[in-house]
Image (tube, grey):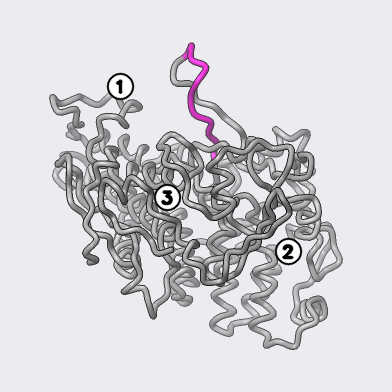
Amino acid sequence: MMNAVIKYRFLLAIAGLSTVLLACDDYLEENPDNRVELNTLEKAAQLLTNAYSPAGYNFVEWMGDQVVFTRGTQKRPNQLRTYQWEETLADPNDQDTPEYYWNGTYQAIAHANEVLAVVDQLPGDEALRRAVKGEALLTRAYGHFMLVNMFAKHYDEATASRDLGVPYVTTPETEFLKEYSRNTVAEVYDLVEEDLLQGLELVNDSYYANSGKYHFTRTAALALASRFYLFKRDYNECIRYSSELLGSNPTNYVKDIPALLQERINTEDYISLYTSPDDPSNILLLRQETIFYRNVGFFPDNNLYNGLFNSNPFRATDLRSDPAYVRGEDGIIATRFENLFQRTSLTSDVGFPYTIFLGFRGEEVLLNRAEAYVYLNRLDEAIADLQTLSDKRYDSQVTVDLETIRNYIRSGNPQNDVLIYIIELERPKEFIHEGLRWFDIKRFDLPVEHTLADGSVITLEAEDNRKALQIPEAAQEIGNLEPNPR
């Protein structure tokens, strides 16, 4: 463990649950110290609805290479700072910031830990106990995994045991000021893996009734394993868990864009179809508080957008460029997610903008497996996965083969490099405005250039320390938590 010790007074969401259990008022009893008495498995299961971070992470899109300084859109000060890779101003209520995500995710982890502390002693059905425990472990694993991949360097086996990670919290908060240590990246990955594998053994979909897509089902856990092992560069395990999810007919987990476009009547219909829990490709749905999709901030300009979707070796029309997009004065945003709003009361005009976000999609798992196949030199299998995706992404039948790709990029590079190139051409198009591009920028050490309002250009270098988001100011000042180097 690292010696950077913190006192989490800045995270009262972890230090106590008194301010975050409003949704549970109907069934939870309040103790004199404002803590919840979890005395049944049913209460524990209900509490786990709060073990999913309410904070969105799409603000990382503003740091990536698919945005420009767009005019005609509103921008908050912290959005501009994010675009310039600067530390954001401390404001715990400002959505779409690293601080908001940090606090919201540790708040979610606190709920998982409250359940895990008592679930083995609660009376009730043993199968339900295992299911509740499995979901709690999976939410804890997911929260820490997302945090370490934002607030630390990307996993590198050569340096992970030295690189600063994030605190991995595994016990409930019973003290107002409690000391923690900042784990290394390797330690965080080891603990995530432990929780993930145990959660996979225990999770049981049969207890979710009609709301399964909003919980960690076994399928969602497999999708997390697919991403986890790809990021860890354990390609055999990535293939193993991806294949278990995708089964013998992976096309079932690829959104049918041609059919979806035929069914679309208007923008609202398209969004509803795109994010529907009935679509098998949508694996985990998350409620996330965000203003990202409200035409604020920075988005691809028309030239960048057209270049992105016109870039394919097949001379075919990419149908992902057709869905409804909102165009500003010189920018564009994908309208894949609905803008919703939760009022603080029935008569209030204030509240929280939010959306229902797709935490995991089958297309990611398919591309994860294709990439893992390439690194293991299983090129035919990688091409087969890319063909499965392409069959539902272009307006005509295309054939994925090495010669076509080579001719397109005019490259004499090894076959493996050619296939990685096409995978990295597909991923930004497939997940535009969904946050995953930032992790690819970190994984592949990609530089990023941003143009400012005055026309000047700033650069985020390939191995720039700013790719590890800075630990929130409150954690540094109050908790004495060691900041990331700059």
Q: In this figure, which residue is indicated by the disc labeled 3?
A: 217
Which residue is nearer to you in this view: 468 or 419? 468
Extent of the magenta region: 346-356
Of the numbered discs in the image, which one, if any, rests on residue 26? 1
Earlier along the polypeptide chain: callout 2 or callout 3?
3
Residue 400 vertical position relative to residue 337 in the rendered view, above or below: below
Distance between the Cα atoms at labels 1 and 2? 48 Å
Q: Tag 1: Cα neighbours inside 10 Å, few (<14), some, or many (≥20)?
A: few
Q: Position of residue 246 (x, y in %)?
A: 55, 62
Which residue is nearer to you in this view: 177 or 425? 177
Residue at the farthest top position: 347
Residue at x 45%, y 48% (from the top left corner)? 98
Give yes or no for contact between labels 2 and 3 (Cβ–Cβ under 8 Å).
no
Q: Secondary structure at mark 1?
A: loop
Specify the quadrant of the image occupied by residue 394: bottom right
Q: Position of residue 78 (x, y in %)?
A: 53, 42
Q: Tag 3: Cα neighbours inside 10 Å, few (<14), some, or many (≥20)?
A: many
Earlier along the polypeptide chain: callout 3 or callout 1?
1
Amino acid type assigned to the residue bearing label 1 in the image: Asp
Q: Is residue 135 magenta?
A: no
Q: In this figure, which residue is indicated by the disc labeled 2?
A: 390
